Image (cartoon, rainbow, N blue to C red):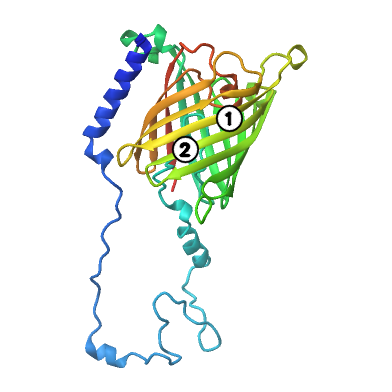
Amino acid sequence: MTRTSIRITAVLMAVMALAAAAPAWAAADSPPPPTTAGPTTPAAERGSQPKAGTKDAPAPAGKPAEQGPDHPADPAAPAGADAAVAQDDDPDLDINYAQPDFMLSALPTTLRVPRNRLTFRLTHRFNQPLEDSGIGDLWGMDSGALIGFEFRFGLVPGGQVGFYRTSDSTIEFFSQYDVLKQGGGMPVGIAAFGSVEGTDNFTDKYSPAIGAVISREIGSRAAVYAHPFWINNSNPDPSELVDDNSTMIVGLGVRLRVFSNTYLVAETAPRVAGYSPGSAHVSFGIEQRAGGHIFQITFANSQGTTPANVARGGSSANNWYLGFNLARKFY
């Protein structure tokens, strides 16, 4: 094994040992036990209750009260109460243990953002390769980093839009919409993806991307992915000087739940056509879920976190970079 492989293995083993030693992290999510105790109605009061079927009888549990001339609407009921109840019943609000986050490392998943809800993500990729660093500079942590932040919003059921900016002044706007959802005889989930990114704060070198995200959840323990993407203007050189100015990739990814809230993540993005310098993007890591937070430590052969940068790959298969992702759901 190379020195880099030994270092990566040692860090992964240390992080997994810490995760296994923290019972609060590995505790399974379980709702609080239902309470059955409640106030009782005295016999005298029960005798004075209106009989069922009469116009003054209360509506049965779970059934809205009738409205009409003899049953006017309750003026104290808040406007939009029914809409609020419907929003709270949105299945997209439930925890998806197979897909706890909207991204693997730099490639998307098919996790849906609930309508009218917001998420935030912070990315960090240190500049110095692990091969050129060590404990003296904390494996590249003293070298500065390429930092990015993202906001993602659920616009409609199954549809999301987002904004992402990195510290090299690249801005990406993206959207994603569920075309098919796994279940009911459908073996996979499919989402349509589209984005456009531009350098110099979205004023130069625009790179649009379109594609699909295909996922297969395996119970609550794993999910596998395929990402057929086409990225235009992936070549940073002027288009009139190059033969290939776009890249076709077929990304592959997996997320494996090894403990209740601990996951292993891996992805790669082989180029199947077009501009393909260096080596294909590869990333793997370990992540921990804590409520609405996801923290991921990642190792990658490139610092790319946008579709165009992922398409450009890494400069050398021997260069690996330490990084992390931090995500937060505001629901």
How far apart in space, not on screen, are marks 2 and 1 (Cα)?
Answer: 13 Å
Alpha-carbon neighbours of circle 1 within 10 Å: few (<14), some, or many (≥20)? some
Q: Amino acid at mark 1?
A: Val
Q: Nearer the viewer, residue 328 or 270?
A: 270
Where residue 12 sits, quadrant-wise, is: top left
Determine whether the residue tagged by mark 2 lies in a helix, strand or loop. Answer: strand
Vertical position of residue 115 compared to residue 83: above or below: above
Vertical position of residue 138 compared to residue 207: above or below: above
Seen at 53% across and 46% down, the residue is 189
Seen at 62% across and 24% down, the residue is 272
Q: Position of residue 13 (x, y in %)?
A: 28, 24
- State which quarter of the image contains the N terminus: top left
Alpha-carbon neighbours of circle 2 within 10 Å: few (<14), some, or many (≥20)? many
Determine whether the residue tagged by mark 1 lies in a helix, strand or loop. Answer: strand
Where residue 309 sits, quadrant-wise, is: top right
The disc label shown at residue 109, or none: none
Q: Amino acid at mark 2?
A: Val
Q: Is residue 233 left or right of residue 182?
A: right
Q: Is residue 311 left or right of residue 142?
A: right
Q: Nearer the viewer, residue 193 or 276?
A: 276
Seen at 46% across and 91% down, the residue is 55
Q: Position of residue 262 (x, y in %)?
A: 33, 36
Where residue 143 sits, quadrant-wise, is: top left
Q: Earlier in the sequence, mark 2 or mark 1?
A: 2
The disc label shown at residue 224, or none: 2
The disc label shown at residue 250, or none: 1
Toward the right, the furthest residue is: 240
Q: Position of residue 192 (x, y in %)?
A: 62, 42
